[in-house]
Every structure is written in C-alpha cells, then in structure tokens.
C-alpha cells in the first residue's frame, strides 16, 4: 500500500498534535501577477513547490516565502497572508517583501552565484562577494522575524527548505529555543575539497547545525556533509547514528529522496482535458507521424541542455534514417535571467537550436522544437504523455522531479526515460536508460536504443518505474521526515 494524503494528515494530527506546522522557502507556491486589469495566479516551475504543495494541502498550516509576483501585495491581508490554493484554500501563505537590493544580494547573488555553483559540479565557478553574504544574512533574519511572528507563543515545528535559508534555524532558535526545526537541502552537497573554497563555509555549516534534523536527497550527500563538518568545524560526528554533536546539541543527518504526488498526477494525466491538449499539441506541431522526445527544464546550466542538443545532432548524423521522423520538444522555463551565466546559456542554446535545425530541416520538419516560456502544469502533462522518450540529462542534480512527473503521468505504461547518472533520481529509477551527458556518442546511441526498444520492454520498464514512484511518493517523504523528528521525542 502506498502512502496517501490521508495517512500524512493522520500522522501530522497524532504526532504534531496542536503544534503549528510552518514551511519556509524562498520560492512561493503561488505567484500573483497582473495581466491587464486582472490578477492571475501562477504556479512556478519549481521542484520544491511542486513537491511541498500537496504536503501543505494535506497538513494545513503556514508557508512563509518571498512574495515575488507583481500583484502579490494586492491580494494579502494586513499580516501579508493569503489563503491558497485559490481553487481549494487549505493553508496560509505568508509573504515576505524584499527590496531590489536584497533580492540581488541574497537570491541572485549569494544563493545563486555562490552556493548554487558551489554545490553543483557543473564547472561554473562560484562568485563570492562579501556584500552578497551580508545581504544573505540580513534576509535570513527577515525570514526568521516572520516565522517567529507566526509562531507567537505557540509550539511549532518549522520545516525549512533549501540553500537560501542556511542560517534560519539558528536565528529562530536564538529567539525561541522551544521551536523544533528540520531543514531539507534540495540540491547536492559537494565534497569537502570543493566546499572549502567558500569563505563563509564554517558559518553556513554551523547555521545548518541549528536544525534538529537535516535532510538531503541521497546518502552520498549526507556523507559529503558529514565530511565537510569534519574538515571545517569543531564538532563530534557520530557516524553510526549519522549525527553531529556540537555544543551539546545534536543534529541528525538523513537521506530523504523527495518525490511527487503520484496518484494526483496520474489522475490529472488521464483526464479528458489532457487528451484534448495532447491532440492540440499534435496538430500545432504536426506530430502525428513523428517519434517524439520531450525534455522539460528550467534553463539552467546544471541541466545539460547543450549536451542533449549535441547528442541529438550526433544521433541524426549517425542514423540519417531517423531524419524527418524524430522531433525533440524542449520545454524551457526561463530562470534567473539576470545572472550573466544564465544569459550566456540562453544564447548558447539559441545558437545550437538554430544550427542543428538549419543543418537537418527539410520541408516542414525540423528536429528541435524549442518552447521557451512558462508552461502550466496541465500543459506539461500533455507533453509528457505524447513522448516516446523523455530526456533528463542534468550534469548534476539533487534529485530531479521531472523524472518522477514523467513517470507518474504515463498511465498508459509506455515511454522510455533517458536519465543522467548524475541525478539523485538515478539511484531509485533503475529501469531508466542511463547516460553520461558528457559522453556525446554514447548519449546518441542511447537515444537510438530508446527509440528502437520493443514495446513489451518499454512497458515492463515503465511498470516498474511507476511502481517505484507510487510506493515512494511525496506523502511518504513528508511522513518519513516527521516520523524521524518525532522519534527524537518532539
Ligand atoms: O533545485 C533547487 C531549487 O531551489 C528547487 O528547489 C527549485 O525547484 C528550483 O531550484 C527553482 O529555482 P528558483 O526558485 O530559483 O526558480
């Protein structure tokens, strides 16, 4: 039996009793934007929010996050709160406002120009500016103030997300030591040799050790974290319990492979609306007699998008019989576009798409359909369902939830997943076809294998993949985090 929303709800009710449940993240789960005279509510393309929203729907409570939409202020109450999701209000979203300078230093700067490249082995050098670090500290304090305000004199369990908020647990506990905190790090943790170039590495590690529980996607990242602690600060490491003891305070370090709401995605993907959307996409892009590959990414240099395009190029050159027959639909969500590295990546991808399409196009066929825009979740499901194969070619990724969304959507038990070995997901999704995204020739060969795989084999693999994701869904993930905490005697 797999975990359900109701199981998680029951667990929260019994284990957390009347404690307030607070999730904190930089990215908000719903963004309000102006669209003419109207206000539109948009769901961001973010693994984190996709994963946590169903948990919050099941548990209720408060989600504290940066209000980044241009109409966000227009919909909140005097405490900066709005009930979400709009169609089924089940929890409260408390928004934090940041100035342009704060957003620059904390989000674009320290979080995404320093920590992001530091933690992902994608050969992008981190940039460390002291001013950004100071803004990062300041914004972590702003988040702490909002969380403390929400808690008041109640008992609370605060579940902190990701690398934007490494100092938060200590700042909360400095004011209210009764609060229990857990933090989940959604990206990889690099090995100590890599991590130690960070000028504020000790403060970051110490900040994270303010938590009672610290989670990573896989055991390997936990080991890297423990080894970093060992190298950087004074602390006792209990390798047997996978715990760090510093100044008499214990932090448990645990792997929790994150997931998605398998049942909900499967239901949505089977709906009549999605079938109609699939038909619309087929007609728009003339896909009826084509072999369709799909990729869905934020445009980020960790995702290996150029590597994937080069592999497709190699494949078409080596197997010309597939020219005019294969189409790669690349959905690309613009991301962090104010950062130079991302601007450069966008140009590189545009060039490659243009070059490859120019090289092979014939009649009204071109091999790459590049769609750079925000795509709504139901729209994405239709793309997944159309695909003969889905490519995830990250150079390094904590987990990668596109993999699990693709699998959950395949209610027809068909479709092949081509998956980078360097994702956290590769540990669980063993029926995928694995690639090293840097090894272009092998990658091209794997595209051929995916296309030529007999239907029976495709279905057998997809059935197993679906079983894995169904059994290890997002409710199990959240349940495991909460159970681990309550075992500590919460
Ligand atoms: O993978 C790290 C992460 O923060 C995710 O949790 C999220 O899916 C993604 O990056 C989105 O990034 P941003 O919030 O910068 O758009």
Image (cartoon, grey):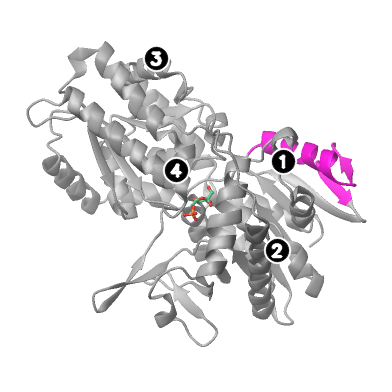
Tell me the crowding category of disc 3: few under 14, some 14 to 19, or many 20 or more residues within 10 angstroms, Cα based. some
Mark 3 or mark 2, earlier in chain: 2
x and y percent of residue 157 in the render?
Answer: 70, 66
Tell me the crowding category of disc 2: few under 14, some 14 to 19, or many 20 or more residues within 10 angstroms, Cα based. many
Q: Which residues are magenta?
A: 218-245
Residue at the (51%, 26%) spot, across then down? 430
Which type of secondary structure does the marked residue at label 4 adopt? loop
Q: CA distance from mark 4 to mark 1?
A: 23 Å
In the picture, the quarter occupied by the C terminus is: bottom right
| Magenta stretch holds residue 239 | yes
* In this view, the mark in front (4 or 1): 1
Residue at the (39%, 14%) spot, across then down? 441
Q: Nearer the viewer, residue 363 or 484?
A: 363
Q: Which residue is mark 1?
A: 197
- Residue 453 in view (yes/no): no
Q: CA distance from mark 4 to mark 3?
A: 23 Å
Q: Which residue is mark 2?
A: 168
Mark 4 or mark 3, earlier in chain: 4
């Amino acid at each position: 039996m797999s975990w359900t929303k109701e199981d998680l709800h029951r667990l929260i009710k019994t284990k957390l009793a009347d404690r307030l449940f607070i999730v904190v993240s930089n990215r908000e789960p719903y963004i309000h934007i102006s669209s003419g005279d109207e206000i539109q509510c948009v769901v961001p393309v973010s693994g984190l929010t996709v994963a946590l929203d169903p948990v919050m729907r099941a548990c209720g409570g408060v989600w504290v996050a940066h209000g980044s939409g241009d109409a966000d202020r227009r919909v909140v109450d005097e405490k900066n709160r709005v009930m979400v999701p709009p169609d089924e209000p089940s929890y409260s979203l408390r928004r934090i406002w940041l100035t342009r300078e704060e957003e620059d230093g904390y989000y674009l700067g320290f979080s995404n120009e320093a920590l992001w490249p530091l933690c992902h082995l994608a050969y992008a050098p981190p940039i460390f500016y002291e001013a950004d670090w100071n803004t990062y500290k300041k914004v972590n304090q702003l988040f702490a103030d909002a969380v403390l305000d929400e808690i008041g004199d109640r008992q609370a369990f605060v579940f902190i997300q990701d690398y934007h908020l490494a100092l938060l647990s200590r700042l909360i506990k400095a004011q209210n030591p009764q609060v229990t905190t857990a933090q989940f790090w959604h990206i990889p943790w690099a090995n100590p040799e890599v991590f130690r170039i960070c000028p504020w590495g000790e403060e970051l590690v110490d900040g994270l050790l303010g938590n009672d529980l610290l989670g990573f996607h896989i055991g390997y990242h936990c080991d890297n974290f423990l080894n970093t602690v060992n190298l950087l600060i004074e602390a006792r490491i209990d390798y047997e319990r996978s715990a760090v003891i510093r100044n008499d305070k214990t932090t448990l370090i645990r792997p929790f492979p994150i997931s998605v709401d398998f049942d909900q995605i499967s239901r949505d993907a089977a709906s009549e609306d999605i079938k109609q959307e699939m038909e619309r996409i087929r007609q728009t892009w003339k896909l009826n007699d084509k072999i369709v590959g799909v990729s869905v990414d934020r445009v980020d240099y960790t995702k290996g998008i150029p590597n994937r395009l080069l592999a497709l190029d190699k494949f078409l050159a080596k197997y010309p019989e597939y020219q005019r027959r294969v189409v790669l639909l690349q959905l690309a969500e613009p991301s962090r576009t104010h950062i130079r590295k991302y601007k450069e990546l966008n140009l590189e991808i545009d060039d490659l798409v243009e070059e490859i399409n120019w090289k092979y196009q014939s009649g009204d066929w071109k091999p790459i359909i590049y769609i750079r825009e925000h795509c709504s979740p139901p729209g994405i499901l239709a793309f997944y369902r159309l695909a003969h194969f889905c490519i995830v070619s990250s150079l390094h990724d904590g987990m990668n939830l596109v993999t699990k969304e693709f699998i959950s959507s395949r209610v027809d038990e068909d479709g092949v997943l081509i998956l980078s070995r360097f994702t956290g997901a590769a540990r669980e999704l063993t029926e995928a076809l694995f690639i090293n995204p840097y090894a272009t020739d092998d990658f091209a060969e794997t595209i051929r294998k995916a296309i030529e795989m007999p239907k029976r084999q495709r279905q057998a693999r997809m059935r197993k993949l679906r079983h894995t994701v169904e059994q290890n869904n997002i409710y199990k993930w959240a349940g495991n985090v909460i159970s681990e905490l309550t075992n500590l005697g919460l």
